[in-house]
Image (cartoon, grey):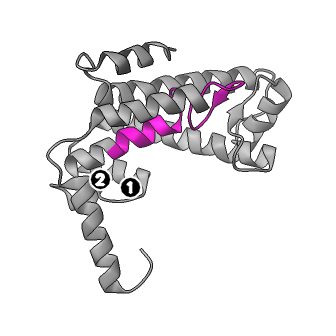
Amino acid sequence: VVGSNRLSREVLQVRDKICFFRKSIDKDGLRHIRAKQILELGKKNGFNAKFSKGGLVDVEYTVQYLQMKYGGEEREVRTGNTLIALKKLFFLGYISRYEYIDLKGAYIFFRKLINALRIVRGNAKDLVVKDDNDEKKYLAKRMGYVATTSVVDILDKDIEYYSKVAYSYYKRYLYDDMSDNPDLYRMYKRIRF
């Protein structure tokens, strides 16, 4: 927060009160926003590394949900940095070592993919992995893959793997029971893998 120390403290106190000291978390609201993102932004001409089902946003929403859930008790998880939040959630015992490794791996993979897409495209908005082998070879190279004849297949398999990892944790923490909201349930049924 920019400004005087007093203003910074006041803004952070308001943030903490809104985000971390609430009686319940509006999972329906979070799920509804995510479903709209997937339907409107995630299915256009390929896999959107940020907004498609299993993309970066699924990791970020999972971590943010855990921060809201435990941030009232644990000041250390109240950070805007996803990787630091994951580390704190793990060290404080709120997620397992496997969850930490999986979520961290997916987050780093998608960040690398998004950065490579930005370099390839020359802009920050087009985050869609198109079905173009030449472009995928260049993306793989920008991400540090070793150039082989099967580098496109390896990149495709990694995208599929990390997408499934990201979505499985999102689903575990935010999709657990939607029987009380049939409209939202029907919306999610339309966006299966």
**Amino acid marked by disc 2:** Lys
- Give the residue pinned by disc 2: 88
For residue 141, side relative to residue 115 (left or right): right
Q: Secondary structure at mark 1?
A: helix
Q: Secondary structure at mark 2?
A: helix
Evaluate whether residue 162 shows in this view.
Answer: no
Which mark, residue 67? none
- Badge 1, how many Cα within 10 Å: few under 14, some, many 20+? some
Query: Could you say where residue 17 lies in the image, as x and y percent from the top left?
Result: 21, 60
Residue ID at (69%, 41%): 143
When the figure is inspected, residue 18 is found, relative to residue 46, above or below; the finding is below
Say which amino acid is labelled 1.
Answer: Ile
Q: Write down the region rendered in magenta.
A: 42-64
Q: Are marks 2 and 1 in contact (CB under 8 Å)?
A: yes
| Label 2, label 1: how far apart the Cα atoms are | 6 Å
- Residue occupied by mark 1: 84
117 relative to 36, above or below: below
**Residue 127: percent from the left, percent from the top?**
68, 39
Q: Is residue 31 visible?
A: yes
Extreme-right residue of the structure: 134
Q: Is residue 120 above or below residue 6?
A: above
Res 21 quadrant in image: bottom left
Image quarter for residue 103?
top left
Which image quarter is the N terminus in? bottom left
Q: Residue at x 46, y 28 (%)?
A: 35
Q: Nearer the viewer, residue 67 or 25?
A: 25
Instruction: Let me know if residue 61 is in the magenta part.
Output: yes
Residue in the foreground of this view, choosing between 56 and 182: 182
Q: Residue at x 31, y 15 (%)?
A: 182
| 155 part of magenta stretch | no
Image coords of residue 111 (percent x, y): 58, 45
